[in-house]
Image (spheres, rainbow, N blue to C red):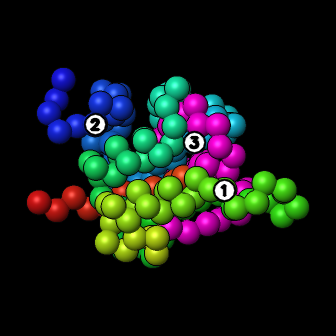
Amino acid sequence: MLKGIPEILSPELLKVLCEMGHSDRIVIADGNFPVESMGKNCKVVRLDGHGVPEILDAILTVIPLDTYVEKPVTLMEVMKGDTVGTPVIWNTYREIVAKHDERGADAVGNIERFAFYDEAKTAYCIIATGEKAVYANVMLQKGVVIN
C-alpha cells in the first residue's frame, strides 16, 4: 500500500500513468464503450465495478491536465436524434475537473461520437469501467508535472 494514492488506482494503472508523457491521452470508458476493439493498439486496463467519476477524480489527483491545449478533457457528444438528452454525469465531470484544474469547466470540450472513437484508437490507454450512464466516456490529455 502507498500513502496519499487513491486506493482505486491499481498498480497496473499507476504504472500506465507513470509511463505516460506530456500530451499522451487516456480514455475512461463507460460500460458500453467498445474497449477491446478500440484498444487494439494501446494499453487496456480493466476497472470493472467502478464508475467513471471516482476514477476520473483519482486520476486527476496524480496527473495534471495539459495546459498547452484549450480543452484537455474531451467528452463524446450525444448523437443527433438520440433521445437521452444531455447526460447528467457531465456536470459531475465538470465539478471534478474544476476541483483539480483552475480552468474548471472551460477545460472540458466535446467531440462527435465517431471522432471520439478515432481519437480513442490513438490513446495511450483505455480504462474499462462498469459505468452504467450513457455517453459517459471521457478522454484526458496529460500535462507536464512540475514540482
Residue 40 seen in the current view? no
Q: Is residue 29 or residue 87 the one in the foreground?
A: 87
Total marks in image: 3
The label number, if any, that marks residue 87 in the structure image: 1
Q: Is residue 129 above or below residue 118?
A: above
Question: Is 142 placed above or below 108 here?
Answer: above
Amino acid at pointer 1: Pro
Q: Of discs 2 and 1, which sits in the foreground?
A: 1
26 vs 1, left or right, is right
Instruction: Check disc 3 and report the residue beneath it.
Output: 29
Which residue sits at x=70%, y=61%? 86
Spatial CA span between label 2 and label 3: 19 Å
Q: From the image, which quarter does the N terminus lie in?
A: top left
Is disc 2 placed on a helix, strand or loop? Answer: loop
Select label 2 or label 3 by which is in front: 2
Q: Earlier in the sequence, mark 2 or mark 1?
A: 2
Q: Is residue 105 visible?
A: yes
Which mark identifies residue 57? none
SS for callout 3: strand
Check if mark 1's residue and mark 3's residue have beta carbons within 8 Å. no
Q: Residues within 10 Å of mark 3 (few under 14, many from 20)?
A: many
Q: Give yes or no for residue 126 being in the magenta stretch.
A: yes
CA gap, disc 2 and disc 1? 26 Å
- The outermost residue toward the top is 1
On residue 6, which mark appears?
Answer: 2
x and y percentages locating residue 83 in the rendered image: 84, 56
